[in-house]
Amino acid sequence: MAQEKLQLRIRNSGGGSRRFAEQLVREGRVTVNGQIIKEPAFMVDPQADYIKVDGKLLQQVGSSQLIIIFNKPRNVVSTMKDPEDRPCLGDVIRKIKDPVFPVGRLDFDAEGVMILTNDGQMAQALTHPSNRIPRTYLVKVRGVPDEKSLKLIRKGMPLSDGERVGDISCSFLRAQDTTSWLKVVLFEGKRNEIKRIFFRINYPVRKLRRISFGPIELGSLETGAWRLATVQERRKLTALVDKTRQSVRGPERPMIERQGTSRHKTKPRSTSRPIRPDSV
């Protein structure tokens, strides 16, 4: 099995967020084959190395793929453990004995669909910005945004801290007395992105619910409940991951063979190193 960074091995084995795993390593609470390692990027072999956290052997992710669909409640941290002792995924999903980790995050006060898995490659494919996996949200904001504001959101906009968000799908759903509901589709998933966007245009978010992540729909799953992914959902996710891998590799180029002979004499080739066709 390929090696991976120590902090990612801890996270992928249900040891909390990447940041929390990094903290564990830097505090000297992690050993690899009996030696304390304080470098989070230290490379380990999950199949050959003995990794312990606070003296306990780190559980290895099972070879069988596990995909769980969860409806996260509000005021729950999107990690399996929380150093601040706030309610987290590990608290509300106690019956899952196999180690899993969340794919991406939802804000502490947001709710909606999350995917938990033990498949690191799938998680990477679903969260990498270059793959543009859509995440759909229902957003309740104060006031009623006008069309000019929505156009500004759709084409991408700079935020107050200088960061710029990419193109976004945003449509108006309905207005209430002092608030309104919108449907927003993100393709990158930056930190607190939706809240920062609507705060920027002076329509602060009052409620945020994610209703889909890629091909996974929230449906009628109750708040705080979880279920295993269906066969059809697993197939869709697998197909999506395969598609992203293919886009990274790019289409294979057939080798071009020189056919026939030229009617004109050619000069002797230079002895310098030729340029490969695939390097042009």
Image (cartoon, helix red, strand yellow):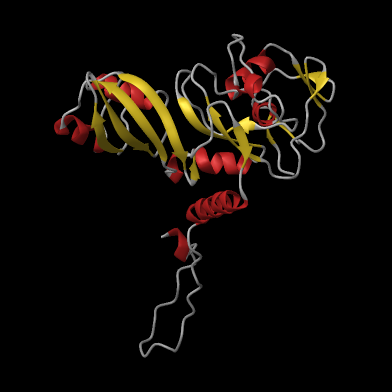
Residue 59 visible, this angle = yes
Q: Is residue 139 left or right of residue 75?
A: left
Report how many numbered discs are placed on residues in the image: 0
Based on the displayed image, in which of its 4 quarters is residue 202 positioned? top left
At which x and y percent is residue 31?
Answer: 78, 20
- Would residue 3 appear left or right of 163 to someone viewing this image? right
- Asked where in the image residue 59 lies, by quadrant, the reply is top right
Q: Nearer the viewer, residue 144 or 175?
A: 175
Quadrant into which the C terminus falls: bottom left
| Residue 245: x %, y % from top left | 54, 52
- Image spot of residue 24 (x, y percent): 68, 16
Above or below, comparing residue 91 to residue 263 in the picture = above
Q: Residue at x 52, y 23 (%)?
A: 73
Indicate the quadrant where residue 69 lies.
top right
Pick the front one: 129 or 79? 79
Compared to 277, does 104 lie above or below?
above
Quadrant the N terminus occupies: top right
x, y percentage for residue 216?
51, 43
Q: Residue furthest top?
A: 84
For this view, does 271 lie left or right of residue 67? Answer: left
Front residue of 36/265: it is 36
**In terms of depth relative to the viewer, which is nearer, 102 or 274?**
102
The residue under the point 20% across, 25% down is 144
Is residue 275 in view?
no
Farthest residue in the right direction?
Answer: 34
Rendered position, 3 above or below 24: below
